[in-house]
């Protein structure tokens, strides 16, 4: 059995399940890793939106083969959702991340209007 995967900047999808901290290839299970480099600050509501969208997208491919193309399409759609959450201010960049990559635009900074 071959492991099929899709990785974008903030979304990693594998046709595998996690057993003893290892990925074990599976024809029936997909594993989602959101923001593995902790580049963003997440709250539970935002994460749940990503997980629900993932479930909806997986369901839309029901009966189709788990191909690299299908996984890439799902990953790309989820990456667009992450961008949307960032643009809406529902998540933010983690400015303490080991990697500062503003691939989705520059971070918003609160500016004190009283400063000349």
Image (cartoon, rainbow, N blue to C red):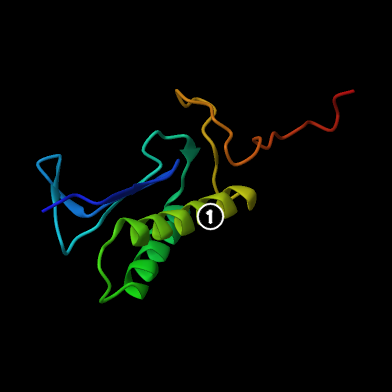
Tell me where residue 23 appears, x and y as whole percent.
16, 44
Q: Quadrant of the N terminus?
A: bottom left
> Is residue 111 toward the left or the right of residue 27 in the image?
right
Q: Quadrant of the C terminus?
A: top right
Q: Which residue is mark 1?
A: 80
Quadrant assignment, res 66: bottom left
Of 11 and 76, which appears nearest the observer? Answer: 76
Quadrant assignment, res 108: top right
> Is residue 69 toward the left or the right of residue 42 in the image?
left
Tell me where residue 3 appears, x and y as whole percent.
19, 49
Tell me where residue 49 appears, x and y as whole percent.
45, 60
Tell me where residue 77 appears, x and y as whole percent.
47, 59
Q: Measuring 72% from the left and 35% from the top, which residue is drawn there? A: 110
Of 13 and 114, which appears nearest the observer? Answer: 13
On screen, 13 above or below 64?
Answer: above
Q: Measuring 56% from the left and 53% from the top, which residue is drawn there? A: 85
Q: Measuring 36% from the left and 38% from the top, which residue is drawn there? A: 36
Seen from this angle, which residue lies furthest right?
116
Q: Measuring 24% from the left and 51% from the top, which residue is drawn there? A: 4
Q: Secondary structure at mark 1?
A: helix
């Amino acid at each position: 059995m071959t492991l099929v995967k899709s990785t974008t900047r903030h979304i990693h999808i594998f046709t595998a399940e996690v057993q003893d901290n290892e990925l074990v290839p599976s024809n029936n299970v997909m594993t989602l890793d959101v923001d593995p480099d902790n580049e963003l600050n997440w709250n539970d509501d935002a994460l749940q939106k990503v997980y629900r969208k993932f479930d909806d997208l997986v369901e839309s491919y029901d009966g189709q083969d788990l191909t690299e193309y299908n996984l890439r399409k799902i990953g790309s759609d989820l990456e667009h959702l992450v961008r949307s959450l960032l643009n809406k201010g529902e998540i933010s960049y983690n400015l303490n991340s080991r990697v500062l990559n503003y691939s989705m635009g520059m971070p918003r900074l609160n500016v004190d209007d009283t400063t000349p």
